[in-house]
Image (cartoon, rainbow, N blue to C red):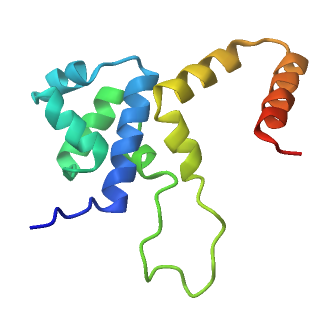
Amino acid sequence: MAKKAPNPIDKHVGSRVRMRRMMLSMSQEKLGDALSLTFQQVQKYEKGTNRIGASRLQQISNILQVPVSFFFEGAPNMPGHTGGMSEAPSPAYVSDFLATSDGLSLTKSFMKIKSSKLRRKIVDLVEQIAGEE
């Protein structure tokens, strides 16, 4: 029997939980302890494998010090909810990037650079390396 793919909204909410947890330098184990769960359950939430219930999401929002709405920011639209018009590309790639340890580390370090001119030069360098004009 084939495994059922996680719902895109569950995956998005889970990735936002992961991103916020990492922003706070909190381990899955520490979040699990605060929720009276195993770190494996936290992993399943973060991957979207297991759906997070409303009361649990409220608990997570309190622990991670963000409003519940934070977890839905940039969520993908579900089929049939587009109103017939094509929409702008989703900024999901930004939250996907920030949900990685490299993305979060790079962003934190970049924001510590005081000189705006130096930050601009770094962006220009990265764009050149990536082949963008």
Q: In which quarter of the image is the C terminus?
A: top right
Please tell me whether residue 40 is drawn above or below residue 96 in the rendered image.
above
- Using the rendered view, name the quadrant where residue 38 is placed: top left
Residue furthest to the bottom:
84
Please tell me whether residue 73 is drawn above or below residue 26 in the rendered image.
below
Query: Depth check: 96 or 56 in front?
Result: 96
Give x and y (percent) for residue 43: 23, 36
Name the residue rendered at 75%, 13% in the picture: 113
Residue 13 seen? yes
Give x and y (percent) for residue 106: 61, 22
Q: Quadrant of the N terminus?
A: bottom left
Q: Is residue 93 left or right of residue 120?
A: left
Name the residue rendered at 82%, 21% in the picture: 119
Give x and y (percent) for residue 41: 15, 36
- Using the rendered view, name the quadrant where residue 18 is placed: top left
Q: Is residue 52 left or right of residue 92?
A: left
Q: Is residue 14 left or right of residue 118?
A: left
Name the residue rendered at 60%, 19% in the picture: 108
